[in-house]
Image: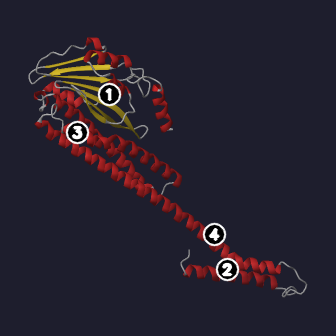
Amino acid sequence: MMIDRIFQEFSRKSGMPPGSVVPVGEKRDQPTTIRYFHYSEKDYTEQEYQKVTELPDDPGVEAVTWVHVNGIHHPSILEELGTKFNFHFLVLEDIANTGHRPKLDDWDDYLFLITKVLTYNEKTSLVMPGHFCIICSENRVFSFQESGPDLFPLLRERIRNGKGRIRGKKADYLVYALLDTIVDGYFSMLEKIGDRIEELEESILDENTDEAFHKIHVLKRESTVIRKSIWPLRDIISRLEKNDWFIEDNTRYYLRDVYDHAIQSIDIVETFRDMLSSLHEVSLSFNSNRMNEIMKVLTIIATIFIPLTFIVGVYGMNFHYMPELEWRWGYFVVLFIMFLIASLMGCYFKVKKWF
């Protein structure tokens, strides 16, 4: 079902020319919000806009401008941003394409970065991947969030209050801060997944086999989504760290720290995948052992009844010269012999620990 939905989303762009800004994702009705930040070590300005035309032009001073767009489902807004700030039409197409894989492109005067935001839905117990793009130049950063809750309240608070180093740094440090916030969010999401795996590991022997298989399958699918979202990020950060014209030397140390966190996230995901594979094998083994126990019990019962069935079959032929037919106690003696045979066989199987 997930694969069908993905192909249906991409089919919207079928036959259109390159650079067509067609949102690929869920259709949303809420308006797009544009937050504008302009700050330096001494000054700070923050404003929220609904229209691109209201955005101020480049102030042309030694300060950093951050424009955060929440909601990329209105192509007209993306096209207006591209026209106003001279973004390539292929970049706008990739921003609208929420199914695009993470990547880093180096254009003439700016960098374009795509990554994935991963959040955990408590109601559905599913991981929700979100599309997130960054366009960064020497003193301007544009971030595009697919939708959803505010991801950077603490970062904005640091900018407002001038806490930390961000107000005294350039745009490359802001890009690092955005990536660092996204990667830190991975750990919170992975913690939720780890708790679910631990609960499944503790209860797998007590649950219904079909239900356990379903939970394992869902978690394996979630781990695949997480892996596809996080794995390319290490190459993106590595390439970003080696960029000469945008990344300053001091910022490279911070990017290395984000790179380490991304590697750690990947290691956790791989560990989860191994654990789920082991749980799947344990569940299969448990199911097989349970079937073996059932078959063993049925085999023992059938084995006990084989000689009894033979005796009953012989006496069921009712020949005239059958022994004990004229004996008053013959019927009860045969029943006693059958009971004795069944008891002896049961004792023998018990001694052999076959049940």
- Mark 2 vs mark 3, foreground winner is 3
Depth check: give the residue in front, 160 or 72: 72
Indicate the secondary structure of the residue bearing disc 1.
strand
Q: Which residue was labeled with disc 4?
A: 298
Q: Distance between the residues labelled 3 and 1?
A: 22 Å
- The image quadrant where one finds the C terminus is bottom right
- The residue mark sitting in front, 2 or 4, is 4
Q: Which residue is drawn at 42% across and 52% down?
A: 200
The percent coordinates of residue 333 (x first, y second) are 77, 85
Task: Tell me whether circle 2 and circle 4 mark residues in contact (CB < 8 Å).
Answer: no
Where is mark 1, residue-wise?
Answer: 145
Specify the quadrant of the image occupied by residue 18: top left
The amino acid type of the residue labelled 2 equals Ala
Would you call the spot at circle 4 few (<14 residues within 10 Å), some (14-19), or many (20 or more)?
few
The nearer-to-camera label among 3 and 4 is 3
Q: Counting residues from the N terminus, which is met first, the one under dot 1 or under dot 4?
A: 1
Q: Give the camera-side residue of 337 and 84.
A: 84
| Marks 3 and 4, how far apart at CA | 64 Å
- Label of residue 239 in the image: 3
- Which image quadrant for residue 129? top left
Secondary structure under the numbered disc 2 in the rendered image: helix
User: Residue 136 at x, y = what percent?
Assistant: 22, 27
List x then y, in percent, for residue 35: 26, 20
Q: How crowded is mark 3: few (under 14 residues within 10 Å), some or many (20 or more)?
A: few
Asked if the residues shown at circle 1 and circle 2 are in contact, with their CB atoms under 8 angstroms apart, the answer is: no
Question: In the rendered image, which residue does mark 2 sit on?
Answer: 342
User: Does label 2 or label 4 sit earlier along the sequence?
Assistant: 4
CA gap between label 1 and label 2 equals 75 Å
Residue 194 seen anywhere in this rendered image of the structure: yes
